[in-house]
Amino acid sequence: MASEKQRTIGVAMDYSPSSKAATKWVVRNLVKAGDRIILIHVLPKGADASHKGLWKSAGPPLIPLLEFMEMNAQARYGVNPDKEVLEILQAESKSKQVEVLAKIYWGDAREKLCEAVDDLKVDNVVLGCRGLGPLKRALLGSVSNYVVNNATCPVTVVRGPTA
């Protein structure tokens, strides 16, 4: 019997309550031993990162979880990782031999998440939903709605905790 191929699961990550919920959902319901999880961060185009010019809009190469957990992730990559999310992923990495990596893009979250699906050859992307009302969603646009309609892989939207 042939072994199953390693799946790559993308998790859209901004460390909001809804993206934390998405991470927990992935760990409980989707990931299997040997899978790869990639945390996909999209920072606004104007985000300050002096080294950004080296990486252009594609961001740095894939960053291993242990490197990303270092205290200087904020200075090096311009993100402020949530300790709880990283600890959940580290435990999953150890218990199921799951490879966890991070990737950073700059630009519009909707477009960059869809781009990441193709760039990273993601088999499934999971993202949180802030639960905007119809008016705010119409004015601001829904990242999850855009990704559901434009990504080239299956998309799972996890509703974040309600206030």
Image (tube, rainbow, N blue to C red):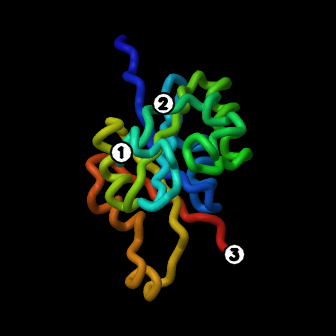
Q: Classify residue 130 by image quadrant.
A: bottom right
Precedes in sequence: disc 1 or disc 3: 1
Q: Are marks 1 and 3 in contact (CB under 8 Å)?
A: no
What residue does disc 1 label? 56
The answer for how far apart the CA atoms under marks 1 and 3 are is 37 Å
Q: In the picture shown, does residue 147 fall above or below 52? A: below
Residue 148, percent from left and from top: 34, 60
Comparing labels 2 and 1, the label whose residue is closer to the camera: 1
Residue 35, percent from left and from top: 48, 28
Quadrant for the N terminus in the image = top left
Residue 6 as seen in the image, left or right of residue 89: left
The answer for how far apart the CA atoms under marks 2 and 1 are is 25 Å
Identity, as a three-letter code, of the amino acid under mark 3: Ala
What residue does disc 2 label? 36
Residue 58 as seen in the image, left or right of residue 63: left
Residue at x-position 41% and y-position 64%: 144
What residue does disc 3 label? 163
Find numbered disc 1 in the image and state the secondary structure of the residue it sits on: helix
- Few, some or many residues within 10 Å of mark 2 (<14, 14–19, 20+): many
Residue 142 as seen in the image, left or right of residue 74: left
Find numbered disc 2 in the image and state the secondary structure of the residue it sits on: strand
